[in-house]
Image (spheres, rainbow, N blue to C red):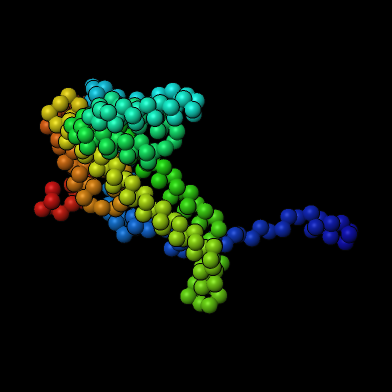
């Protein structure tokens, strides 16, 4: 009987102790630290995620002008490396002889993109925009290139933050101001990861600012054309995206101005109702003097 009771007790599973939840430190939120300093603005962005979707790349604009150029420019077939290199050299020679040829700039930029040389593509399109400041195809392609660069920067920043989170840890209840706690938070590996994450976030913020500037140039150049409604919606879209990473209130004003211009162009368009609703939401977070 005693042996049976002992065996029964051994078969009973041990009580599972609840795991202590790891305390979050400020390093865990490094990627979003600047957003916390602009909590109200970040909330606006999260509340308006739906707006980004409907404005992306000229949805509902009824035009394939700039939006077509933005989406189609870098969709060319990728040939062999040597063939692309020879075409690049050929375009470079042609541009030296005809520096105002807009088509050559976009073609050369496409070739650079096929080689994953985005910086060279942007430099080429910037030169093309300087030679042809009102060419919508070049300005649209440039905006797309900057947006792709911003998305790449976002991926880098997210990866850097993930690396920091997976390597850095603090013991639950550990006082980080103590000597032992400081050892856990200031080792060379953790410090290097913190620096990389912070640097990546700064590059991300800069990349989105450049993308927004490029879309503003395209919208300005398209003023009075059939492409303007689409361009204004795209400008509003990138401004809302930039808001999430720069945390600047000016992004709200840019988005509002773009939506208002869109409504002036197409007051009964398919995106008019959402544009009005978004403007109202954005304005509620601005001082009355800035509405």
Question: Closest to the observer: 50 or 167?
Answer: 167
Q: Is residue 168 left or right of residue 267?
A: right
Is residue 22 shown above or below 61? below
Identify which residue is drawn at 23% across, 22% down: 62
Q: Position of residue 142 (x, y in %)?
A: 29, 35
Residue 54 in the image, given as x and y percentages of width and height: 29, 32
Q: Is residue 230 visible?
A: no
50 sits to left or right of 76: left
Q: Nearer the viewer, residue 236 or 50?
A: 236
Q: Is residue 122 above or below residue 95?
A: below
Examine the image and state in which quarter residue 118 appears: top left
Query: Is residue 19 toward the left or the right of residue 30 in the image?
Result: right
Which corner quadrant of the image does residue 46 belong to?
Answer: top left
Q: Quadrant of the N terminus?
A: bottom right
Q: Is residue 128 above or below residue 179?
A: above
Depth check: 268 or 114 in front? 114
Q: Tell me what residue is drawn at x 49 percent, y 61 percent.
A: 192
The reply to whether residue 202 is visible in this rendering is yes
Q: Position of residue 182 (x, y in %)?
A: 51, 73
Q: How many marks?
A: 0
Point out residue 269 in the picture as x, y percentages from the top left corner: 19, 26
What residue do we see at 25% from left, 28% from top? 98
What residue is at 21 percent from the left and 42 percent from the top? 255
Q: Is residue 111 above or below residue 19?
A: above
């Amino acid at each position: 009987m005693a042996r049976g009771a002992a065996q029964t007790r051994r078969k009973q599973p041990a009580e599972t102790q609840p795991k202590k939840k790891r305390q979050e430190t400020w390093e865990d939120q490094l990627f979003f630290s600047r957003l916390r300093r602009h909590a109200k603005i970040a909330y606006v962005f999260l509340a308006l995620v739906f707006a980004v979707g409907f404005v992306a790349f000229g949805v509902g604009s009824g035009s394939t002008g700039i939006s077509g150029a933005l989406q189609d420019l870098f969709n060319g077939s990728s040939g062999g490396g040597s063939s692309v290199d020879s075409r690049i050299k050929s375009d470079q020679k042609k541009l030296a002889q005809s520096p105002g040829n807009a088509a050559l700039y976009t073609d050369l930029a496409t070739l650079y993109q096929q080689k994953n040389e985005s910086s060279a593509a942007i430099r080429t399109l910037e030169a093309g925009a300087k030679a042809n400041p009102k060419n919508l195809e070049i300005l649209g392609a440039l905006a797309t290139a900057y947006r792709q660069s911003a998305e790449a920067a976002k991926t880098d920043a997210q990866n850097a933050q993930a690396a920091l989170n997976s390597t850095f840890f603090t013991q639950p209840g550990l006082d980080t101001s103590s000597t032992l706690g400081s050892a856990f938070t200031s080792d060379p590996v953790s410090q290097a990861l913190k620096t990389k994450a912070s640097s990546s976030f700064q590059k991300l913020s800069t990349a989105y600012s450049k993308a927004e500037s490029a879309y503003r140039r395209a919208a300005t150049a398209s003023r009075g054309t059939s492409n303007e409604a689409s361009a204004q919606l795209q400008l509003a879209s990138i401004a809302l995206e930039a808001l999430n990473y720069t945390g600047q209130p000016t992004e709200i004003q840019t988005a509002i101005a773009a939506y208002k211009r869109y409504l002036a162009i197409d007051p009964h368009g398919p995106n008019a109702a959402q544009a009005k609703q978004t403007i109202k939401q954005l304005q509620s977070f601005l001082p009355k003097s800035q509405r």
